[in-house]
């Protein structure tokens, strides 16, 4: 059983790396959208040195960062993280070579010649931005769910946090912002590019910002789920036997009964604490109204729910994005 789980986990990492690479190759790289991080910087550098592929620049960033992680952070890099960090650029280069007919098209990353011109979305930049970002988020989320990371800007964020006392989330934002500004200078205004007279494409920076937002949300969704669970407190002067039976039998859930009293009146009250899915909230509220129309009810979001019938508590080495 353990062997099967290990094989499935490694297969998940490979699948995640493939989806991540495909998102860049087919929907992001050809349109010079810069979604922050290592591969965003690689896209910018490819514009300066077209003969060097985006994945190759990825290696140039990832390998030194992995070494720095060990040297400065003392990180014990797992085999899965190393494999993911080295596999993604390889897949990106392989897919790029397969997607373009010749070296000229490959160096230019010409969308008009991508897959024989059958996937040219030059007139639909928002569509390609959304699809590419979603694929990158899905791929990265799958990798993280299988206890690995793709390295890159995460390591830079940890270095900034340790040596400059910058919060990790702010550090990642700073890194992504710096990469987008780099892209704005090189791709938007043509600074340092072989053809400085090229038409300005500064508006691509806005697509880059959209891409960064979509990627972060999709990663969080893949790892943590919808997070649509609802937390309900019900306070009543009555014994809510019918409500208890509804929770136990109809919803097939349980709740916690808390003995309480009113702060002002001092009267004994019954309080129920329960967590339900968002689809079950309406039924619970209707039942409460039938049992005690004067009950005091609080419904709020449950950020995370662990325990029987819900998710398992995370292990000490489990990675979460938020």
Image (tube, grey):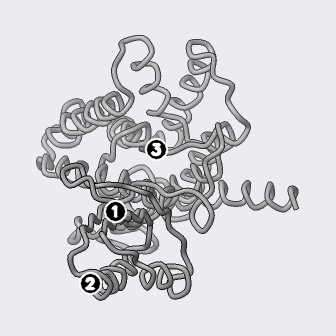
Q: Nearer the viewer, residue 152 or 204?
A: 152
Q: Position of residue 45 (x, y in %)?
A: 37, 35
Disc 3 residue crowd, few under 14, some 14–19, many 20+, Cα 10 Å:
many
- Marks 1/2: CA–CA distance: 17 Å
Badge 3 element: helix
Quarter of the image that includes the N terminus:
bottom right
Tell me the residue that label 3 is attached to.
Answer: 54
Quarter of the image that includes the C terminus:
top left
Q: Is residue 233 visible?
A: yes
User: In which quadrant of the rendered view does residue 188 lie?
Assistant: top left
Q: Position of residue 142 (x, y in %)?
A: 57, 57
Query: What residue lies at 42% left-to-right and 11% top-to-bottom?
Result: 163
Query: What residue lies at 62% left-to-right and 44% top-to-bottom?
Result: 148
Q: Earlier in the sequence, mark 1 or mark 2?
A: 1
Q: Nearer the viewer, residue 31 or 164?
A: 164
Q: Position of residue 132 (x, y in %)?
A: 38, 62
Tell me the residue that label 1 is attached to.
Answer: 269
- Marks 2/3: CA–CA distance: 60 Å
Query: What residue lies at 38% left-to-right and 65% top-to-bottom?
Result: 270
* Residue contact at pointers 3 and 1, CB within 8 angstroms: no
Badge 1 element: strand
Q: Nearer the viewer, mark 3 or mark 1?
A: 1
Q: Nearer the viewer, residue 179 or 197?
A: 179
Q: Earlier in the sequence, mark 3 or mark 1?
A: 3
Q: Earlier in the sequence, mark 2 or mark 3?
A: 3
Q: Is residue 285 above or below residue 194?
A: below
Tell me the residue that label 2 is attached to.
Answer: 289
Q: Is residue 138 above or below residue 78?
A: below
Badge 2 element: helix
Q: Nearer the viewer, mark 1 or mark 2?
A: 1
- Marks 3/1: CA–CA distance: 65 Å
Q: Is residue 21 visible?
A: no
């Amino acid at each position: 059983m353990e062997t099967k789980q290990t094989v499935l986990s490694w297969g998940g990492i490979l699948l995640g790396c493939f989806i991540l690479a495909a998102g860049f190759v087919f929907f992001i790289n050809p349109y010079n959208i810069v979604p922050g991080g290592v591969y965003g910087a690689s896209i910018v550098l490819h514009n300066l040195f077209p003969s060097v592929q985006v994945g190759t620049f990825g290696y140039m960033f990832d390998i030194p960062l992995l070494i720095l992680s060990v040297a400065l952070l003392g990180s014990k890099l797992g085999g899965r993280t190393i494999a993911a960090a080295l596999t993604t650029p390889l897949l990106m280069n392989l897919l790029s070579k397969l997607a373009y007919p010749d070296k000229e098209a490959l160096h230019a990353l010409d969308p008009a010649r991508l897959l024989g011109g059958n996937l040219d979305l030059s007139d639909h930049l928002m569509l390609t931005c959304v699809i590419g970002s979603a694929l990158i988020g899905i791929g990265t989320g799958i990798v993280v769910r299988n206890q690995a990371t793709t390295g890159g800007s995460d390591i830079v964020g940890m270095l900034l946090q340790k040596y400059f006392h910058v919060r990790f989330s702010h550090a990642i934002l700073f890194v992504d912002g710096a990469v987008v500004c780099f892209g704005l200078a090189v791709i938007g205004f043509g600074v340092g590019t072989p053809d400085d007279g090229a038409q300005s494409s500064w508006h691509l920076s806005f697509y880059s910002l959209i891409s960064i937002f979509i990627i972060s949300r999709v990663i969080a969704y893949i790892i943590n789920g919808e997070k649509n669970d609802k937390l309900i407190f019900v306070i009543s002067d009555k014994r809510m036997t019918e409500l208890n039976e509804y929770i136990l039998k109809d919803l097939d859930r349980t709740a916690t009964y808390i003995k309480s009293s009113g702060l002002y009146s001092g009267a004994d009250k019954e309080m129920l604490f329960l967590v339900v899915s968002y689809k079950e909230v309406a039924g619970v509220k209707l039942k409460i109204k039938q049992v005690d129309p004067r009950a005091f009810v609080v419904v709020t979001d449950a950020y995370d729910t662990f325990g029987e019938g819900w998710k398992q508590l995370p292990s000490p080495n489990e990675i979460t994005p938020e």
